[in-house]
């Protein structure tokens, strides 16, 4: 049997945001189609408007599109500004509706703003230590990403693994 490759993926990017040694987690709205009521980190989907309406950085390409998307999504979703975005890991899934997704997980520093939630996206938030994060019903894999972020901010990098 021949396998057919699908090239069109929904691309999402998330931010493990650090402020005063704690991480921002948010609880997904109970009305969300995917993973309602579970705790995660802010982020969202890349849209073509994140680059198509901008001038290209070189003759053929737009650069920093993921970083721009992440800044926009974090600002929209939780109302804060971030910087020093670094890659942590990536994951892929095929959702129950058949949509394939690629998610890029990043580490970022809090810059400014007060957390203000988009209630249709998230209904609660908390700044937590790695130990405190264990007390929340996190989306599967998020705790492991927080562990990676903790190591990364201490200068140790490794690929995702179950903690």
Image (cartoon, grey):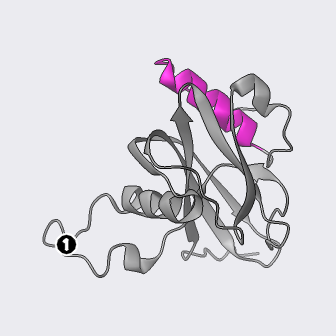
Quick check: 136 left or right of 114? right
Residue at the spot 58% in from the left edge and 57% down from the top edge: 78
Could you say where residue 30 lies in the image, as x and y percent from the top left? Answer: 85, 67
Specify the quadrant of the image occupied by residue 147.
top right
Quick check: 134 left or right of 116? right
User: Is residue 123 found inside the magenta-colored segment of the image?
Assistant: no
Could you say where residue 105 lies in the image, as x and y percent from the top left? Answer: 56, 47
Magenta span: chief secondary structure: helix
User: Is residue 158 found inside the magenta-colored segment of the image?
Assistant: yes
Residue tagged by mark 1?
56
Residue at the spot 79% in from the left edge and 71% down from the top edge: 32
Residue at far left of view: 59
Residues in magenta? 141-160
Is residue 6 placed above or below 151 in the rendered structure?
Answer: below
Placement of the C terminus among the 4 image quadrants: top right
Is residue 63 placed above or below 83 in the rendered structure?
Answer: below
**Front residue of this view, candidates 158 and 118:** 118
Q: Alpha-carbon neighbours of circle 1 within 10 Å: few (<14), some, or many (≥20)?
A: few
Residue at the spot 71% in from the left edge and 68% down from the top edge: 119
């Amino acid at each position: 049997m021949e396998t057919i490759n699908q090239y069109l993926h929904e691309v999402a990017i998330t931010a493990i945001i650090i402020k005063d040694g704690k991480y921002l987690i948010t609880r997904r709205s109970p009305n969300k189609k995917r993973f309602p009521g579970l705790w995660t980190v802010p982020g969202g989907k890349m849209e073509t408007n994140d680059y198509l309406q901008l001038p290209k950085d070189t003759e053929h390409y737009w650069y920093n599109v993921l970083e721009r998307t992440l800044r926009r999504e974090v600002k929209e979703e939780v109302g804060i500004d971030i910087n020093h975005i670094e890659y942590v890991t990536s994951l892929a899934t095929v959702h129950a509706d058949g949509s394939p997704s690629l998610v890029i997980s990043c580490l970022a520093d809090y810059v400014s703003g007060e957390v203000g939630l988009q209630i249709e996206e998230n209904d609660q938030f908390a700044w937590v230590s790695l130990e405190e994060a264990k007390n929340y019903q996190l989306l599967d894999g998020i705790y492991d990403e927080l562990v990676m972020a903790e190591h990364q901010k201490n200068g140790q990098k490794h690929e995702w693994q179950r903690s």
